[in-house]
Image (cartoon, rainbow, N blue to C red):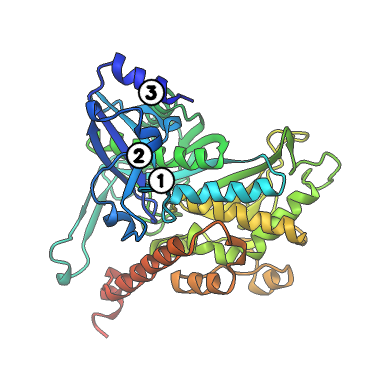
């Protein structure tokens, strides 16, 4: 990773004129401000840099003005902008330069402080992220009162006259039906060459209408969250340059499965992956790994507000349901323990399947890890795995197998968190949590007030 000196040398040697300072709000949206390189000095890496009024993103701070402190590890050259480099930034409070408690990047750091107190040296996260790339999207945002109105066009969509539509092979469709292979390759190469985040694989998504998927190699938790946010930034901008548009909303198209975010987590004590046990007959999963799974299952409903954080998330969960269970197969369980190969000590992980790409990765990754660590602390039994196809089981069969249901909406998810939040103590500040939940409740209220196309179809002639 670059040092501050190396970053400054690159800016000087390459006559770079603009420095893009990027930071995140509670919802995980990328914000930015840009300064001229002559105003950017090495002091910014320690003392921060004043970039206007950050209250718009974080609200009023009683402690002092908010500053941006660039993280040199996130230095990268933006290939689609001439003479521009970027840093992801921590948000600090002047004059003491303490971390802003509403800064999402701080959540991942606080999680690692708790983890290290348990003797854990690292928690690595690998991300498999789905998203859509559309040729055109139009939304009537001006005269909403006249009725719902949005139009989507994608070259692979079933309503497009192009012959590229192919609904049968999903993620395995070949070219030319996988029409955006070159675009995914370009995104992957930019992530590796310009930002140093390694891409493990990329492929067509499960849904037919130009859905895409990228898998990022494992990184320490905060770096993994940086990588996901950067990947979204790259996808959006390269799509825009190609006169297309991309979206990470969970379910943009009715009748498809929507976009998922699968996070593979491993816990390390030095060189030891504590999830691996060669003697385990089921999936070579250690007892600590089973306790971790037990924590995820116990807190799955409370996690939903962070892992399925939008009203649209719950529409996606209806289209592609998951249940509170675990196993080693892709069978509708919210937790999966991969076991395609035996004796893979370095690769052994626990996969949380129940997230989507609308998450704030700093909060979601940390909350999932906190739930699992709570399971390890409490030695929480994860129960028996369920390797049947849960989605095809009858309700009674699910009940007999101990399979439980996830929340069906934001209100229910908030309610679950209100009764189950002790596992987040010391990780999520009360200031950030209050702001986050207030935003979620406001989103639900706005959603409830709007008339949908389905309501016109169903009730216009009631």
In the depicted structure, whether residue 403 falls above or below residue 34 = below
Find the distance from the CA under tag 2 to the CA under tag 1: 8 Å
Dot 3 falls on a residue whose secondary structure is: helix
Residue under label 2:
48
Q: How far is disc 1 from disc 3 in space, using C-alphas?
A: 22 Å
* Front of the two marks 2 and 3: 2
Residue, x 43% and y 60% (percent of image)?
A: 432
Q: For residue 361, which numbered disc appears in the image?
A: none
Q: Position of residue 170 (x, y in %)?
A: 48, 43
Q: On the rendered structure, is 184 left or right of 331?
A: left
Residue toward you, 83 or 143: 83
Q: Which mark is residue 7?
A: 3
Residue shown at the point (31%, 55%) measured from the top left: 57
Residue at mark 1: 97
- Quadrant housing residue 396: bottom right
Q: Is residue 410 left or right of residue 179?
A: right
């Amino acid at each position: 990773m670059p040092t501050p000196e190396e970053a400054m040398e690159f800016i000087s040697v390459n006559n770079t004129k603009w420095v893009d300072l990027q930071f995140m709000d509670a919802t995980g949206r990328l914000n930015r401000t840009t300064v001229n390189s002559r105003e950017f000095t090495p002091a910014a890496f320690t003392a921060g840099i004043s970039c206007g009024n950050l209250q718009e993103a974080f609200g009023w701070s009683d402690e002092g003005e908010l500053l941006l402190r660039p993280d040199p590890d996130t230095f990268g050259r933006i290939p689609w902008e001439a003479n521009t480099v970027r840093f992801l930034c921590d948000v600090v409070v002047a004059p003491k330069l303490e971390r802003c408690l509403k800064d999402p990047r701080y959540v991942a750091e606080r999680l690692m402080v708790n983890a290290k107190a348990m003797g854990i040296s690292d928690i690595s996260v690998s991300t498999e992220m789905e998203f859509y790339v559309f040729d055109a999207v139009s939304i009537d945002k001006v005269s909403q009162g006249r009725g719902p109105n949005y139009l989507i066009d994608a070259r692979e969509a079933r309503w497009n006259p192009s012959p590229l539509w192919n609904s049968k092979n999903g993620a395995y469709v070949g070219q030319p039906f996988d029409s955006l292979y070159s675009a995914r390759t370009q995104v992957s190469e930019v992530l590796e060459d310009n930002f140093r985040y390694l891409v493990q694989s990329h492929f067509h998504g499960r849904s037919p209408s130009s859905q895409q998927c990228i898998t990022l190699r494992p990184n320490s938790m905060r770096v993994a969250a940086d990588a996901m946010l950067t990947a979204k930034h790259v996808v959006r901008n390269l799509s825009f340059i190609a006169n297309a548009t991309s979206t990470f909303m969970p379910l943009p198209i009715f009748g498809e499965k929507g976009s998922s975010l699968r996070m593979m987590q491993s816990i390390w004590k030095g060189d030891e992956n504590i999830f691996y046990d060669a003697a385990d007959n089921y999936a070579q999963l250690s007892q600590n790994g089973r306790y971790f799974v037990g924590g995820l299952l116990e807190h799955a409903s409370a996690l939903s507000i962070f892992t399925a954080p939008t009203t649209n998330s719950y529409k996606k969960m209806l289209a592609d349901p998951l249940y509170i269970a675990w196993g080693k197969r892709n069978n509708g369980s919210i937790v999966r323990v991969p076991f395609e190969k035996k004796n893979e000590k370095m690769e052994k992980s626990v996969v949380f399947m129940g997230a989507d790409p609308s998450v704030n990765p700093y909060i979601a990754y940390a909350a999932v890890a906190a739930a699992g660590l709570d399971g390890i602390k409490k030695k929480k039994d994860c129960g028996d795995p369920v390797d049947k196809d849960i989605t095809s089981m009858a309700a009674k069969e699910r009940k007999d197998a101990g399979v439980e249901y996830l929340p069906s909406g934001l209100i229910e998810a908030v309610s679950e968190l209100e009764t189950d939040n002790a596992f987040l103590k010391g990780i999520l500040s009360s200031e950030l949590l209050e702001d986050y939940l207030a935003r979620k409740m406001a989103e639900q209220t706005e959603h409830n007030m709007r008339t949908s196309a389905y309501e016109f179809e169903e009730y216009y002639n009631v």
